[in-house]
Each structure stands twice: as C-alpha cells, then as structure tokens.
Image: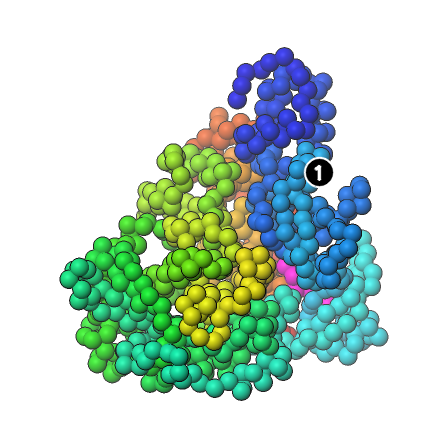
Amino acid sequence: MSKPRDAKFPDKAALLAFIRAHPGKIGTREIAREYGLKNADRAELKRMLRELADAGTIRKSGRRKVAEPAALPPTLLADITSRDADGELIAVPSEWDEQDGDAPKIRIHTPRRPKPGTAAGLGDRALLHVEPSENRDEGPAYVGRVIRVLDRGRARLLGIFRALPQGGGRLVPVDKKQAGRELNIAAHDAGGAQDGDLVSVELIRTRAFGLGSGRVKERLGSLATEKAVSLIAIHSHDIPQEFSPAAIRESEAAEPATLKGREDWRELPLVTIDPPDAKDHDDAVYAEPDEDPDNKGGVIVYVAIADVAYYVRPDSALDRDALRRGNSVYFPDRVVPMLPERISNDLCSLKPNEARGALAVRMVIAADGRKRSHTFHRVLMRSAAKLNYAQAQAAIDGRPDDITGPLLETILKPLYDAYAIVKRGRDERDPLDLDLPERKILLKPDGTVDRVIVPERLDAHRLIEEFMILANVAAAEMLEKKALPLIYRVHDEPTVEKVHNLIDFLKTLDLSFAKGGALRPAQFNRILAMVKGEDSEPLVNEVVLRSQAQAEYSSENYGHFGLNLRRYAHFTSPIRRYADLVVHRALIRALNLGDGALPQTETVETLAEVAAQISLTERRAMKAERETVDRLIAHHLADRIGATFQGRISGVTKAGLFVKLADTGADGLIPIRTLGGEYYNYDETRHALIGTRSGVMHRLGDVVDVRLVEAAPVAGALRFELISGGAIAERSHRKGPKGNAIGRAKTGKSSAGKGGGPAHAISSKKASKSKGRNTKGSKPAKPKKTKSGKGKR
C-alpha cells in the first residue's frame, strides 16, 4: 500500500478501484491511511462503504474488512427478493456459500416487451444471464436478464402433518432453517390430511410470538414408514417423479438396436465393472497390447457406452422429460431416474451375452501413458461379463471366483496392465489429489439406517475412473476438431481472493504456498503432501477443497482445473446425465453415424441455456441427496439424546461450530452462545472461534467430543454441546477488540461445554441471531428430551 498523502476524499469509483487492487485485505483503517483521512472523515467513509455493501457492490470479508463480491457465472439461478429505490427488481443467487460473504445483488433488466415466460416478479425464481454492471459504484455489481421464470412466487411451506386429539394439527417443517417453528393447522384447514402426511401448506398468518397458522393446500404422500423419507427431498426440491404418458409410450414402443448402420463388435470381450447394487450398466471396457512396432509397450483401450441417442431423439417426449430432470437422483432407498426403466434398465443396460447398441471409442495409448490417437464407432456389442469392483479386484489379488477365473488372463490382467500405463500419464498430469473419503448408508429392510460405511478405494475404481476420463477427453477433442458446439464439463481455477485467503491460512501453520506463473493443481498437491499423515491433514484438505470453484456444465470451454485438462466433456453416462446425451448426439452428427444426431438448430447460444439448466439440476440432486442422508441419520440418532460422540469441526461460522461425527458422518451445530461464559471472535483467516478472555480456540478440523442435545429427524437437524477443551492462543498475540494478529496455539483447557442453551437453538438461523462475532455465553440449561419419532415418518 502507498504512503499517506494529503487528504483527498475518494469518490465511490476510487474506493472500488482501491478495494479491487487489494482483495480481502482492505478495511476502513487501510482506506483512511491510503487517502490521509482524519477521524472526522471516517463517519462519511463508513457511510459510503455501507451504501456500497447494501447495493451488493462490495461485501464484508472477515473482521472489519471489505472486498468485491465473488465472481458470478454468466448464467445462474436466482431468487428475486426486493426492489431498489427506482422500483427495479433485485435478485440474489439461489445457491450461495455463506462462507463467501454476503451474496452479490443483481439488478434485473426488464425489456419493454418481455418474451413469453420471462416476465418476472417478486418472489419468483428465475434462470438469469448476468454480467458485471457498468455502474458498479452506483448500485448492484451485476445486471441480469431473465432467460426463463422457473418458479412463481408462493408463500408455502412443506412439512409433516401431526394430528392433534382435539382436531386439526401441527405442521413440522422439513426445512432445517425452519426447525422448531411449527404452524397451527385448524381442523377446517387440514384438507383431510392424516397424521404423518407430507403436505404443502399455505401461510395464513404469522405472529411475532406464538404459533403462526396455515392451510393445507396439497397432500403429497404418507411418511408412515421410513421408506418414504426421500419423498421429503423429492417434493421440497420439485424433482419430477412421474414420466409423461407420451414418454412412457415412446419407451415401450422402442425396439432393440440392430446391426444396421453399426460395426459388429460382438466378439470383442468387453466387460462392465460397477458397484454391486448397480441396476443399470452403461459403460464397458476392454484393453489389449498394441502390436504396432511404432508404439512399443503401448496399449489399446476400448470404452463402449450405451447408445441412448438411438432411443431418445431430440425434441421427443423422452427428450423433454430427460432435459427437465437433467440427471438421475440417487437416494439410499430409491433412484429417481432420468429415463424410464424400459430405456435405462433394459434397452440401454449392457447386460451380459445380450446384443446392445453402443457408441464406442478406441484409444491408442503410448508406453508413457499419453493418448496417441482415438477413433469413435457406432457398434453392436455383447458384454462378456458383469463384474463389481471388489470382485474384479479380488481376482487380480489372487482370489478369482467362478466368473472371474476364466476372464483373469485374457481380460482382467490386460485391463490392469493398461491401467498401470494410463496411470503414468495421470501422474504426469498431476491433477488435484484431495483425500476426501465418501460414506455410504446401508439400510435395514424397513428403510431405517443399519450402519454407515466408508467403502474401500480399490484399483478397480481407479481403473474405470481413468478410462472414463480418457474417453471424455477424446470426445471433447473430436468435437472441437469438427468445430461442433458441445457442452463441456468445466472447473474454473480458484479466485484470486480465495487463493489469498488460503495463503493467509497456511501461514498460520507455517506452510508456504508456491506462487508464480499460472495456477496449477500441483501447487495445491505440494501442500497436501506436506501434511500427509499429520494431525492437520484433514483440516488442510478441507480448506483446500473450500478454496476451489464448483464444477459445472458450459457451452464455452475454460478447462477443468481439478483434472488439469484443457478440454473435457461428459460422454460416459448418457443414461443418467443429459450432458452426455448431448455429446453423443454431437458425435453422431460430426461423424455421420446415423440417426439421433444433434439438430442443426442447436448452437452455442442454445446449448448455453441447456448447460445452465442441467448445472442447476445437478446441484439440486446433490442437495436433495445430502438432505435425505441427514434426515435418515437424524432419525437414527433421535433415541440417543444425551449420548457422547467424537467428531471433527467441519465448519466455523459466526453462528457457531458445525461438527461431523466420526462414525456416521452426521453433521450438527454447536450454537456459539453455548460455548461458554465469554465472547467469541470469529477469525476468518484461521477458520476459528476464539474466546476473548480465555483465548480458547475452536478451529476447523479440530477433533472434539460432543454430546447430542437435540435431534429433529424431519428436518435432518442435530444440535450438539461441546464437552472437550480447545487450544489456547497465546495472550500476547491473541486477536482482541482491536484486531491484533493471533499467534501460535498451544494446548489448554476450555470453558466450553458448560451451557446447553434452549432446545430450539437447533436452527442455525436462530443461532445466528446471537450476533455471531461477539456473543455472550448463555446460562446452562438441561438438554431437552425429545421423542424418538418412531413410526411417525
């Protein structure tokens, strides 16, 4: 920063330019020093910053810091929430990580004659095309144009109806943010709802104190059994369940693919390798040594993918239903498929010893693991075997069974030999290597949780993963060569601000981040390797993950940072992802492979809208799947109120600490006001809450012991009480009211866990009312007991 100069009060444009030049590091003090402002000028400076923040032009970034809003993608889903002083509609992104600060605001441009389906109003949810505002110093940072209104504003709540003996009932909301906020449903407003029904309720009135009232508008299904728990997520996220009658008729009328217009690959011994519970098998693989003397030590890898484009033609009823769904959604108890079972589980499932149409790629790989060439083919194939990952791995490890034994020498060993070569190329490429184990819920026959496991990561998994990546790259390269529009799978590099934040965090661990030149995954991998096996490994993995952008679909290519690939497209799962179906159609058109090609009317512009829509349905599916797991585990733990568990701090916010339990992976909140009888500062750089008096520090990644205080199964919410100590920040370096830096931490006792707080504090929204950063501990309270909820879902 420059030295102080003679005071010259900056205008908003100058303030913005200064903030942009120093991302994440600027506050009132630094601005005043830069412009030589005296104390008398600071009130005006704070007023200007507040106006910029209210307009969404800047955002708060940590304690007393401001920054530009994080960059928005060109197309996104947004909620229209208000109007500005000129009456213009203002929207905010529907999906926004609170750890990125306040959501940037978007001013909606309304044309004089809006196209059908684009006239938006307050409360609507819409797909927008956004771009930075030319007058960012005078209003919102972005201007948006409505592409399509997806959901008209409506004041409704989803919840479980609980009947009362005297008639009528209560609505138990399914939204975590509404947990503990029941509604009264009068008998004449119940609409025939029975105890345990999932219902949609219209708000009649709300009250500052006491229960609000509602009227049942729609009965959505019964949750009398746990097998129906995924219905909550399906309805709360408006995931389509039923196919249109026209789509069903098309699927039932479809005939199996024949050899007409296809190459005959039925003698090539391709095999499928999938999870043991997979119902559809849309990819098959085979490998063999390359006999070409010019490719000594090389291999040929074949990947065949079910030819969904043969059955699902553009603008057919099946196509319209598939686009509306965007992808299949996988719950522990069911699958909501993108396509009817006749297509996904029958005609396009590569079953053993049955002829199936496929779109295949033949890839020649050099001995160093680099792909030398590839060709695409429309074929008729016959799978030689259906294997699961553990079964294939066991055979390679010396434990073949009746199925894998005859395949070991001729099919499985060549596959693993090819993987060993492909892995050399992968290692040379050095993609981002985060260690983030995934948990899987196993259910009992009644639909309740049996146990939660972390499946072992096998070479069989990696083999299929790397072969699919190779095929996806080949598809993108082929379509670029043919100059055809396509949908890329893209992953942007981390923003400058997130990299700065990561660097500041790593400094607290005495770790340096190698800068210089273009950002590469290898720079992050070096940090991950340095903490391998250390206590800080989970913490660093988590913070590195949070520094990354979110992958999405786009008609424009800006590469895949995580995989360290210049071009990448999804080609290998057209049964369950619409993006892959578009790529198949484009390949058919590019190579003149017959029917089902991408229409000539499809352009980069039209595919941009498709890409934005399926990016949204992908995020919708991920959120719905995650919420269903939360509800299942919350029900599983509901009868263990008062039990103690070990976990790890998975999130630190102004509202409190989020803890992930070690055995189940369940997430729950420790409200900040229950941490002890003192104020706690939220330190964004360290990802920690720090007591101002004791110096007790609770940090992201810390292992902690907690007591379960409350479980709300319907909302999937848990509330914990901290019973273990934290670390102590040295007093001479601890951040105090003036924002001094925090020094090294040392082990010490904590005053945490002394207070439980009221049971309704399970709502993170309610917990945040405690003003976050400086929140005084509450008086201890006994944990409120709750019923297990048995038989009420």
User: From what the image shows, is residue 192 above or below residue 788?
Assistant: below
Percent x, y for residue 286? 28, 72
Q: Residue at x 46, y 35 (%)?
A: 504
Magenta span contains residue 175: yes
Q: Is residue 270 left or right of residue 734?
A: left
Q: Is residue 164 left or right of residue 93?
A: right
User: From what the image shows, is residue 526 above or below residue 171?
Assistant: above
Q: Residue at x 21, y 81 (%)?
A: 406
Query: Considering depth in this image, is 412 or 735 the residue closer to the camera?
Result: 412
Which color scheme did the rendering employ for the protein? rainbow
User: From what the image shows, is residue 40 above or below residue 658?
Assistant: above
Instruction: Classify 10 Å Cα crowding around label 1: few (below 14), some (14-19), many (20 and above).
Output: many
Percent x, y for residue 767? 65, 49
The secondary element bearing badge 1 is classed as loop
Residue bearing the label numbered 1? 139
The amino acid type found where label 1 is placed reads Gly
Percent x, y for residue 731? 49, 28
- The reply to whether residue 457 is in sight is no
**Start-end of magenta stretch:** 171-177
Magenta span contains residue 238: no
Percent x, y for residue 546? 48, 47
Total numbered labels:
1
Q: Residue at x 60, y 29 (%)?
A: 17
Q: Residue at x 39, y 79 (%)?
A: 261
Dividing the image into 4 quarters, which one contains the C terminus?
bottom right
- The reply to whether residue 164 is in sight is yes
Q: Is residue 459 left or right of residue 603?
A: left
Q: Quadrant of residue 525?
A: top left
User: From what the image shows, is residue 71 above or below residue 331?
Assistant: above
